[in-house]
Image (cartoon, helix red, strand yellow):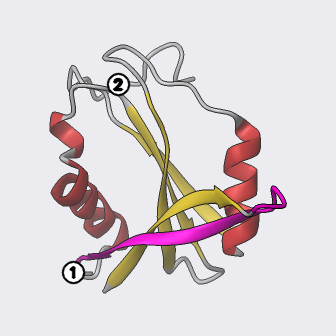
């Protein structure tokens, strides 16, 4: 299966739009969420990043992936982003659902206080 990585850009008139910057391939082996996790590790070295990064995976009504967008890149302790950018990307992609994900550079699997 192929998944587009998008970037949020603006026209000369300041109108936002999504542009595909890379086509990512991944195998859907029956478990979509495991396949997406594997794809994040493969393309973004998700488990080995030195800095915290946040992504959203846009899904259609049937929970099929429409694309992926990196929301933010922070330092080794945190990352921050504007909720309006997430809303804008979801609206522009016509997503019905989404998955929000981010890494912990220290490989902690428990959510931190700021995650909650």
Disc 1 residue crowd, few under 14, some 14–19, many 20+, Cα 10 Å: some
Q: Is residue 64 above or below residue 54?
A: below
Find residue 111 and name its label.
none
Q: Earlier in the sequence, mark 2 or mark 1?
A: 1
Residue 82 horizontal/vertical position (percent): 69, 34
Q: Is residue 111 left or right of residue 64?
A: left
Q: Observer-nearest residue: 70 or 61?
A: 70
Quarter holding the N terminus is bottom left
Cα distance in 3D space between marks 2 and 1: 27 Å
Quarter holding residue 92 = bottom right
Quarter holding residue 102 = top left
Q: Observer-nearest residue: 59 or 25?
A: 25
At x 75% / y 52%, what residue is drawn? Answer: 87
Q: Is residue 62 within the magenta segment?
A: no
At x 61% / y 79%, what residue is drawn? Answer: 60
Q: Is residue 100 above or below residue 33?
A: above
**Magenta segment:** 12-27
Q: Under tag 2, what secondary structure?
A: loop
Q: Is residue 78 visible?
A: yes
At x 57% / y 23%, what residue is drawn? Answer: 116
Magenta stretch prevailing secondary structure: strand
Q: Is residue 33 above or below residue 79?
A: below
Q: Under tag 1, what secondary structure?
A: loop
Q: Is residue 95 visible?
A: no
Task: Find disc 1 in the rendering and name its residue.
Answer: 27
Residue 34 horizontal/vertical position (percent): 27, 63
Task: Find disc 2 in the rendering and name its residue.
Answer: 110
Q: Are marks 2 and 1 in contact (CB under 8 Å)?
A: no
Q: Is residue 13 within the magenta segment?
A: yes
């Amino acid at each position: 299966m192929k998944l587009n990585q998008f970037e949020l850009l603006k026209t000369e008139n300041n109108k936002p739009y999504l542009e595909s910057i890379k086509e990512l391939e991944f195998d859907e082996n029956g478990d979509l969420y495991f396949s997406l996790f594997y794809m994040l590790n493969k393309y973004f070295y998700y488990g080995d990043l030195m800095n915290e990064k946040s992504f959203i995976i846009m899904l259609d009504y049937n929970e099929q992936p429409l694309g992926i967008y990196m929301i933010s890149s922070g330092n080794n302790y945190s990352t921050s982003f504007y909720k309006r950018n997430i809303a804008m990307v979801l609206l522009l992609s016509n997503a019905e659902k989404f998955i929000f994900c981010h890494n912990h550079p220290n490989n902690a699997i428990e959510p931190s206080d700021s995650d909650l």
